[in-house]
Amino acid sequence: EKEIFDMVYNSDTCIYALSQPKNEANCLYFAEGSGGLTVWDNRIGKSSSHWDLHESRINTIDFNPESPHIVATSSSDATACTWDLRCIGGTKHTALRTFTHKRSVQSAYFSPSGCSLATTSMDNTIGIYGGVNLEDQTSVYHDNQTGRWISTF
């Protein structure tokens, strides 16, 4: 109503995605630069963590609704990964699972139950992963390249 805004974060690098877990009202997760994931903590007024997770930019960030410490990222490096935020640290990061496509992965989102993951890629496929550790895979053809300047599917 008052049209008053606070700038909470400013970066010299491009920010490609933004996400907030349901259980953390004071934390924002930014995908910025070339494969980096940054955590902004509003309680301390600064970035609390930064990890280089992918070789190329991160296109989406999604939190598992049942296990909010599990996050999925999609990347222009032709992979989507799931990560356990409790285990990320140091300089080397290991994904729980890596889902590989032939071209850029534009999105990776958990189902509302958190028991499956869907990815979309510029290789004209939709990947659907399920099972206990997302090991069951189904790939569906879908023309994801419309030739128009619109958001990628």
Image: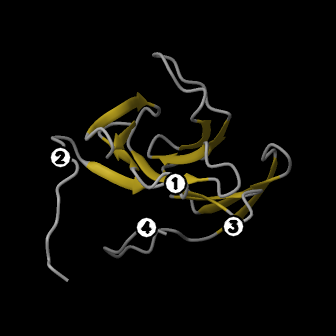
Mark closer to the observer (4, 1):
1
Structural crowding at the residue carrying mark 3, measured as other residues with C-alpha within 10 Å and reported as few (<14), some (14–19) or many (≥20): few
Q: At which x and y percent is residue 66?
A: 71, 55
Upstream in the sequence, badge 2 or badge 3? Answer: 2
Q: At which x and y percent is residue 36?
A: 37, 36
Distance of label 2 from label 4 (alpha carbons): 26 Å
* Residue in the image at 81% along x and 44% along y: 135
Distance of label 2 from label 3 (alpha carbons): 31 Å
Mark number, residue 112: 3
**In the rendered image, which residue does mark 4 sit on?**
152
Upstream in the sequence, badge 2 or badge 4? Answer: 2
Rendered image quadrant of residue 1 = bottom left
Q: At which x and y percent is residue 136?
A: 83, 50
Upstream in the sequence, badge 4 or badge 3? Answer: 3
* Residue in the image at 57% along x and 63% along y: 124
Structural crowding at the residue carrying mark 2, measured as other residues with C-alpha within 10 Å and reported as few (<14), some (14–19) or many (≥20): few
**In the rendered image, which residue does mark 2 sit on?**
10
4 displayed left or right of 32: left
Determine whether the residue tagged by mark 2 lies in a helix, strand or loop.
loop
Q: How is the image coloured?
A: secondary structure
Upstream in the sequence, badge 3 or badge 1? Answer: 1
Mark closer to the observer (2, 1):
1
Circle 3/circle 1 CB separation < 8 Å: no
